[in-house]
Amino acid sequence: MRKHVIAGNWKMNKNLAQAVALADGMKEGLNALPDIDIIICPPLTALAAVRNAMQGTTIAVGAQNMHWETEGAYTGEVSPQMLTSMCSHVIVGHSERRGHFGETDEMVNRKLVAAVLHGLTPIVCIGETDAENRAGQTLEVLDRQTTRALAGLSAQQAATAILAYEPVWAIGTGRTPAPEEANATIGLVRKVVRREHGASAAEAIRILYGGSINPNVWPEFSVQPEVDGGLVGGASLSAADFVALAAQTRAAFLAKSGQ
């Protein structure tokens, strides 16, 4: 049974004091939830402080982005080497990075490979736009993004990555696909991993759902057999909501594993 994951992407929110306060506000509730992986991804300016706030807990900390080079003349960027002392995970390929900053599939792949080589666990975002969804191109887009993102990795390396299916049209809009539809789509992504990296990698890799997740809708998504957890945006900025989502994720995992 794949261990479930709940990850919170705080995006460009919270100054240093606010980030530490939010971390402190959810720490006790999250630490009381064993059996699943819990990751919070604050802004870079608060990464070290939130890591310190979470010391002594089971909660992991992740970055929201990084460059693929180890060092160099890349003003304003942060390298994987810089992140390894502050966090264990990193989000790559989020649709906002692709859409607002022009990140390509090739750039996502370079970041993912660099993360793996430096011992960071990548949370790789994939997802179709509203136009692509309406044109019936969802599978084509996800096949391309998944294949190119994981290119160059061994089966073992691919298996340790985390994929996050976030339909772009659902992020921050309050719109979501039907839980069964999201489950079927994630199942198709798993088939792509099987084709490219083999059955063992496909069975081991964890694929999350993201896009307007909140405690009211999450129970129906989290129990889907192909859904291995969630990547949360806005709701992760509320300590109470994120703890509730983590508890729901744990309950779904225990139910699926017969515990």
Image (tube, rainbow, N blue to C red):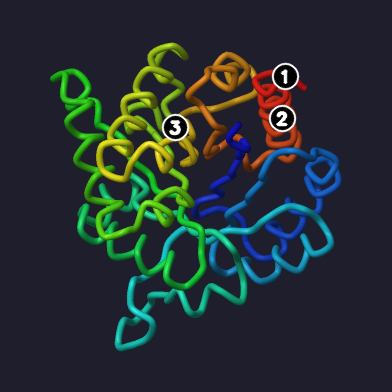
* Label 3 secondary element: loop
What's the residue type where badge 3 is placed?
Gly
Relative vertical location of residue 210 with respect to residue 118 in this rendering, above or below: above
Residue 61 percent coordinates (x, y): 63, 58
Q: Report the residue marked by disc 2.
A: 250
Q: Nearer the viewer, mark 2 or mark 1?
A: 1
* Label 2 secondary element: helix
Label located before the other in sequence (3 or 1): 3
Query: Is 1 on the left or on the right of 247, as rendered?
Result: left
10 Å crowding of disc 2: few (<14), some (14-19), many (20+): many
Query: Is 243 on the left or on the right of 149, as rendered?
Result: right
Residue 23 percent coordinates (x, y): 74, 53
Q: Report the residue marked by disc 1.
A: 258
What's the residue type where badge 2 is placed?
Arg
Question: At x 36% / y 71%, what residue is drawn?
Answer: 67
Question: At x 51% / y 64%, what residue is drawn?
Answer: 120
Question: At x 46% / y 35%, what residue is drawn?
Answer: 203
Mark 2–mark 1 distance (CA, rounded to whole Å): 12 Å
Q: Quadrant of the N terminus?
A: top right
Label located before the other in sequence (2 or 3): 3
Query: Is 193 on the left or on the right of 121, as rendered?
Result: left
Residue 196 percent coordinates (x, y): 26, 43
Q: Report the residue marked by disc 3.
A: 172
Q: Nearer the viewer, mark 3 or mark 1?
A: 1
Mark 3–mark 1 distance (CA, rounded to whole Å): 33 Å
Query: Is 224 on the left or on the right of 142, as rendered?
Result: right
Q: Using the rendered view, name the quadrant where residue 112 is placed.
A: bottom left
Question: Mark 2 touching mark 1, by CB under 8 A?
Answer: no
